[in-house]
Amino acid sequence: MTFDESDLRRALDARSGDPSPEYRARLHQALAQPRPATNWTAVIAVLTVTVLTAGTIGILVAARNARPQGGVASGARVSTPSRIVLPSYAKVMAPNSTVVWVLIDGRLFRSTDQGNHWQERPMPPQFGVRAAISFIDDQQGWLLAPGSPTTQCGDAAAQIWHTSNGGATWTQLPATGMAAAQCKENISFVDSNVGFITAWDDNHRPVIYHTSDGGMTWSGSPLPDPPDFTTQPGGDTLRASWVKRFGTTLYLMAFGMQESGQRQYVFTSNDGGATWRWKTKVASPYVVMVTESRWLQLVWPGQSYESTNGGQQFHLYDSDFHTDTPVGGPQIVFADANVGYAEGRGAVQRTTDGGAHWVRIKTPGT
Amino acid sequence: MGNDRFEESLERVLDPAFRLAMTILDERTAAEDAVQEAALKAWRHRTRFRPESDFRPWFLTIVANECRSARRARWWRVLKLAEILKETRETRDDERMDLAAALGRLSLHHLLPLSLYYHLDLPIEEVARVLGCSENAARQRIHRALAALRPEMALETDS
């Protein structure tokens, strides 16, 4: 059986498409506007050129992260109309059954009543675009501020900030031992001393940094390839997401592409994160560990799965969880066996019965 | 590169950039997000762009990287566990698979050179710049991508 060049071109054409006039116009508008209407008067007085530069960046950021009630520029997301008109980038952290933190569009919020009421908390002076947070209670937490990466995440600086008073003040940590190589993506502290930062790039195995002194010094160890995964330059690499601790065992999720498709794995460590061992393969990178034995894969009603034996077998799970998130998937975190939160494109949901039922709660800052 | 020149350059490459994102991601919303993200990054790093360089391969490289990230993160690739074995069986039964489906199963490593060369009709020199390799290596990438597209299918070309 053969195909010719025109068949291939037709098949590629069928997958392709042109940008819509609306998309083109809004992208053009975002780039054409000289500056956002933000309170940068003092900066303008100092250096007009700098403001013009920063203003355009602000507009682009605003266009990317449509904030419905924000004061920044047009606030228009350059895409087809979303089913959820909310900011697109958020991190949720639930350290215990009552406290939940949300970092959304560069603003930090804390709730001490399961998300019923929110209080905005200060951020560090520098936190970048894709910051990540980890809190162990309503006071103590860390913020990872990734720097701008080189191509394919070859190198990227990162700053680590710490607060012990709920964000009222932040201290930058020296982060000794953190290499320049790779993009630093996620931060997870399991207590006041022990924490992890995941790093990845498109050409090497991911590195999991761990600290046992509250983030002052870090040691990195590469994540080994599972038996059916071969790290290859050009994108066939693993990328780690969450780290959780149950008892003395650490669990880590990593996912990546192979020639045959996407793969995702759970790794474990019994030496505090110095070494990691592949434990099992899972069907989705969005599997969440509720407890050490109970794992959930929440998609939408009728397509959610549960494992009660640590991921060995999954069965259909009756949950009303659903999300409108088209890209990137929902971010789901559990504080304990019952209380959990899900976030997708800024919409936040909460469960108090272990994932069976979910209710939409107010997204802070909207 | 100044704002006006950047905007003009972006306008000129928006169509091929979007088509590249569409062929790789096969989903309009994801393609819009990827191109938008690429535009943001390109603007931030525009000082790295050398005036003598061609804007198109530079921007397409950024778009390709954004598409790579998007493919890694896309969650609709979630497989229902009950379908894993079924999918494996269907994969083996690929006699019924058409070219479009084969493209859908192709890895980004192979899909990208095919999109650049056969869909955007870029010259091999420009394909090589986007892929970050030599022209000979780019030709090999295309050849291997064709082989991976359908091992039992052969592409009939004049050359």
Image (cartoon, coloured by chain):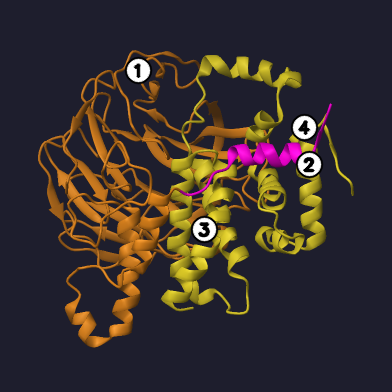
Chain colours: A orange, B yellow
The front one of A139 and B71 is B71
On screen, residue A120 versus residue B94, left or right, reads left
Whole-percent x, y for residue B17 in the image: 55, 55
Q: Could you say whether the residue bearing mark 3 is in a helix, strand or loop?
A: helix
Q: Is residue A6 magenta?
A: yes
Q: Which residue is mark 2?
A: A5
Between label 1 and label 2, give the one nearer the viewer: 2
Crowding near the residue tagged with mark 1, few <14, some 14–19, many ≥20 C-alpha atoms within 10 Å: some
Between label 3 and label 4, give the one nearer the viewer: 3
**Residue B14 numbered tag:** 3
The front one of B37 and A285 is B37
Give the spatial CA distance, label 4 vs label 2: 14 Å
Name the chain letter of the residue that bears numbered label 4.
Answer: B
Q: Are marks 1 and 4 on the same chain?
A: no
Whole-percent x, y for residue A36 in the image: 25, 68
Whole-percent x, y for residue A138 in the image: 17, 46
The span shown in magenta is A1-19
Name the chain letter of the residue that bears numbered label 3.
Answer: B
